[in-house]
Amino acid sequence: MILNVLAVLAAVVFLVLGLLYLFILRTNGKQRKKPHIDTDFEPQRALNYPPPFPNGWFSLCSASAVQKGQVIEVTAFGKKLAVFRGHDGKVGVMDVYCPHLGANLADGKVVGNRLVCPFHAWEFNTQGNCEKIPYCDKENYNERTRAKAWTVNENWGLILVWHHANNEPPTWHTQGYLEELKVYKHHGSSSELLHMHLQDFSENGADYAHFGVVHNLLTIPLLNKFFHVEHTTNIEFGEGNEKHMAWFTDIADIARTKDKSIIKDAGGKALVTYYGPGFLVFSFKTKFGNPIIVKTFTPIGKLKLRMEDHVYAPKGSFGPAIKYIVGEATAQFHDDINIWERKTFNTNPVLVKGDGPIMNMRKWYSQFYGHNKQDSQNENTPHGSHLNQSNETPNEKNLSETTNRGDAHS
Ligand code: FES
Ligand SMILES: [Fe+2]
């Protein structure tokens, strides 16, 4: 009984100190100290990485960023895109440059449910079909007068598009997942431009060995003298209808550095669900709150991507506690990002026992590149070698550390 009371007290002390640190020492939202990026060398650093634009669903922006009758310009996949919402509420996404004489459609306007080009006033519907040219009869409209429209899906409070190097249709969908977001409270969003390849985010979960090095410190400097974080990690890969998904679990315990004893209830558990290459969804389970972070990755160029965090929590959650938990997670991610923005990609890494199922992760991830010509031509990469790394490496032992998960996941 007394031990239980002491454990709860210790946990409360952690929360209080955490909140104090968050609100007093970091009141002005201390920014990540960004590493130096040698921009001249970036093309060289990019050479070993897989293609920059894997196939899948990606977020372009929050749904609320495009109101009825509005058009905005968004950069993604090495292109500029025009995202507009008709007065019927439906969203259209198209390549920003008009098929006629190349004006920027994001400088146009929405009339009814159509996007109107600012140059000669051609009118396009959300499917990209040209429906009106003020000075030319309809019988002259054809395939060539179409704008390139993207497959759009509005879900999870985001405007999503399907990207495929060969323009193949979606092989999976986002519907039926994260339904709780409809009733959870939105606790804010943030956006950051990063100089890295999005595959490194996914490999994070399979790289068990880095947790004890990169993620062992609390963000509260004073407490770091006496306590550290211990992680127990596991990753599973989907199969069948859910082969684009994976599930990573991290149990983060707070331990006394002196004797490594765990402080009960002071840590937490994070379940991270991968939805293809574009999303990692963090569900935290802690004594103080259970927030969800929908983390989106939108590649915009070689070693350039936009990361957005959208934070949700059940209604009635204690706001400062949600802020603290998300602040801790964000700090941990920044420690990773500082490494990812400076690293290269070893296509045949030297792995040893204890490294985690990194090659299995790469095998799983290779489904998002596909085996097509355009992948290797598209934006560079001389290789394709990243597709062939799976089975016969000296690292095969690592593969057995992983379990596969069938369709039964819910
Ligand atoms: S450039 Fe768009 S209508 Fe002419
Ligand atoms: Fe990490």
Image: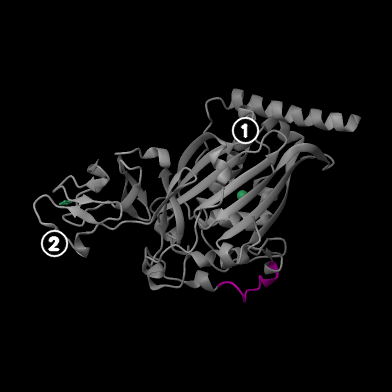
Q: Which image quadrant for residue 169?
A: bottom left
Q: Is residue 394 magenta?
A: yes
Image quarter of the C terminus: bottom right
Amino acid type at image mark 1: Ile
Between residue 129 and residue 195, name the one nearer to us.
Answer: 129
Q: Which image quadrant for residue 266?
A: top right
The single residue placed furthest to the top in the displayed view is 24
Select label 1 or label 2 by which is in front. Answer: 2
Is residue 293 visible from the viewing direction of this image? yes
Question: What residue does disc 1 label?
Answer: 322
Q: Is residue 254 left or right of residue 373?
A: right
* Relative vertical location of residue 64 with respect to residue 166 in this rendering, above or below: above
Question: What residue does disc 2 label?
Answer: 139
Amino acid type at image mark 2: Glu
Q: Is residue 126 left or right of residue 343?
A: left
Image quarter of the N terminus: top right
The single residue placed furthest to the right in the displayed view is 1
Is residue 334 visible from the viewing direction of this image? no
Between residue 271 and residue 375, name the one nearer to us.
Answer: 271
**Rounded to the nearest whole Å, what is the CA distance between mark 1 and mark 2?**
58 Å
Residue 124 percent location from the top left of the image: 23, 51
Which mark, by number, is residue 336? none
User: Residue placed at 86% from the left, 32% from the top?
Assistant: 4
Residue 95 percent location from the top left of the image: 29, 54
Q: Is residue 30 magenta?
A: no
Nearest to N terminus: mark 1 or mark 2: 2
User: Residue placed at 51% from the left, 59% from the top?
Assistant: 344
Image: magenta residue range: 389-398
Q: Is residue 21 left or right of residue 186?
A: right
